[in-house]
């Protein structure tokens, strides 16, 4: 599908070169189409960036909401949120990096929608942490700092995770859940026997190649 091919080209270039340094002709060449066809499918370069970021943030939100619905217990909800955040970041590395870094490239007209989506996603963590602290299952001196530490820790996976690495993705997800429990003074034994790790969704925008010279397929 041409739209998906354009999005993959955009993600690859935006993640490696940056949005500002990527030209519209370069996008067309990477996607294998001319500039006129490119405009037909995505409009402006910013429209392309917005569509990529919107889909990525929506993917994070949907995975997070599903994690919350799986249980009413804050510890299990936290485990599901952290697991889904790490998993989604790991399989959609370049797309996640574009969504993380290129908010600054958006115009004043385009930024509020995406910022609201990011805030909505982060509020899922805030809600769970606040409830967990209120009923006494989480302990921290600063709930906001704990939330930032947990989210940013998981986001970093997009920069270094490799499927051919020492640990399988589920092991990485469980490791990060264990670290989040330590941040909040929760005994990880509380999660024994609970299945909170689920396979993350691979976005159509995620390139099949991670970068020049890397022949690895995603997924």
Image (spheres, rainbow, N blue to C red):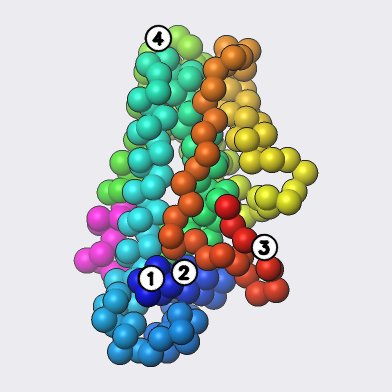
| Residue at the spot of label 1 | 1
Residue 88: percent from the left, percent from the top? Answer: 50, 45
Q: CA distance from mark 4 to mark 2?
A: 44 Å
Give me the residue at 70% from left, 73% from top: 213
- First in residue order: circle 3 vs circle 2: 2
Position of residue 149 measured from the top left corner of the image (x, y, whole percent): 54, 37
Q: Are the two marked residues, 3 and 2, in contact with CB atoms closer than 8 angstroms?
A: no
User: Which region of the structure is painted magenta?
Assistant: 103-115
**Residue drawn at (59%, 14%), measured in percent from left and top?**
193
Q: Residue furthest left?
A: 109
The image quarter containing residue 114 is bottom left
Distance in Å between CA atoms under marks 1 and 2? 11 Å
- Residue at image position (55%, 56%) is 93
- Toward the viewer: 128 or 141? 128
Give above or below for 53 relative to 25: above
Neighbours of disc 1 within 10 Å: few (<14), some (14-19), many (20+): few
């Amino acid at each position: 599908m041409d739209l998906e091919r354009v999005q993959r080209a955009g993600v690859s270039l935006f993640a490696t070169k940056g949005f500002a340094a990527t030209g519209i002709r370069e996008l067309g060449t990477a996607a294998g189409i001319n500039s006129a066809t490119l405009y037909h499918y995505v409009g402006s370069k910013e429209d392309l960036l917005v569509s990529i970021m919107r889909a990525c943030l929506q993917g994070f939100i949907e995975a997070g909401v599903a994690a919350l619905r799986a249980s009413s217990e804050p510890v299990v909800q936290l485990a599901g949120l952290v697991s889904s955040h790490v998993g989604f970041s790991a399989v959609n590395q370049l797309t996640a990096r574009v969504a993380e870094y290129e908010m600054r490239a958006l115009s004043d007209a385009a930024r509020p929608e995406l910022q609201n989506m990011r805030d909505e996603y982060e509020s899922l963590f805030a809600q769970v942490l606040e409830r967990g602290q209120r009923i006494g299952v989480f302990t921290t001196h600063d709930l906001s700092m704990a939330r930032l530490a947990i989210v940013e820790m998981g986001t970093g996976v997009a920069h270094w995770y490799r499927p051919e690495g020492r640990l399988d993705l589920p092991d990485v997800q469980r490791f990060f859940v264990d670290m989040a429990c330590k941040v909040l003074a929760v005994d990880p034994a509380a999660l024994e026997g609970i299945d909170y790790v689920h396979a993350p969704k691979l976005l159509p925008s995620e390139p099949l190649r991670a970068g020049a010279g890397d022949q690895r397929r995603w997924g």
